[in-house]
Image (spheres, rainbow, N blue to C red):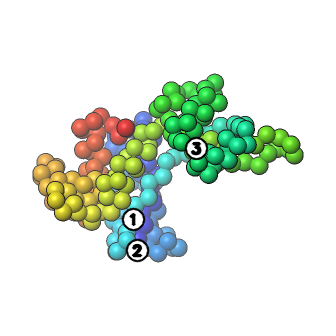
Amino acid sequence: MSTLILTLPLANAAPPPEYDYVLTSDGQQITAQGRTAASLLPATAGRGAEVVAVIPARALSWHGITLPERVLRSMLSGRIEPARARGVLAGVLEEQLLDDSEKLHFAVFGAPPAASGDAPRAWVAACDRAWLCLNKLWNSESHFNPKALNMSSHAFGIAQFLPTTWGNYKVAKTVSAKLQIQYGLRYIQKRYGRYSG
């Protein structure tokens, strides 16, 4: 099983964007690594091949917060409703955020108190939701499987292109994850202007 791990380019990257990547055939040894355009990314091969997209560190902001212990435990365990957790985090982080909280995704990580008796602390990573929309879309469409096939519509691959979509790009249907990502991003850029929710 081969795995291609790539860092998504920053939203303001000059077209065509370049991807830092690592390819491994077994999860232990690096087969290839480098930086290149999507069309030149190495192909994944074998049963269970996967592509992992990583958000660049510069696209994240980190914020230390203090919350009541019960609230923090509920967030970390997933027992709090997402909408309520989002509201709590938006309220706590209101003064620290440069962007509208509705445009951000939050991830909460517990941290030990600085001293005995201190209130529970957490770290919150915030990033533009656009980074996660593409992951959510393609994970729900194909689980990033370049061989995924919808039997009723005949949509195929990571981006679930219909046969007519492949034809519009004058490219033959392919199992190459790198080509599917390349043409999937082109399709989204052309149709919607960018990949955001």
The percent coordinates of residue 141 (x first, y second) are 31, 54
Q: Is residue 167 left or right of residue 3?
A: left
Mark 1 surroundings within 10 Å by alpha-carbon count, few (fewer than 14), some (14 through 19), many (20 or more):
some
- Provide residue 102's location: percent of width, then percent of height: 48, 30
Relative to 166, say whether 115 is above or below. Answer: above
Q: Which residue is the site of mark 1?
A: 50
Residue under label 3, please give it: 80
The image quarter containing residue 5 is bottom left
Mark 1 lies on a secondary structure that is strand
Query: Which amino acid type is marked by label 2?
Result: Met
In the image, which is nearer the foreground, mark 1 or mark 3?
3
Residue type indicated by callout 1: Glu
Question: How far is mark 1 from mark 3, CA to CA?
Answer: 32 Å
In the rendered image, the residue lying farthest to the right is 116
Callouts 1 and 2 close, C-beta under 8 Å: yes
Disc 2 target residue: 1
In the image, what residue type sits under mark 3?
Ile
- Secondary structure at numbered mark 3: loop
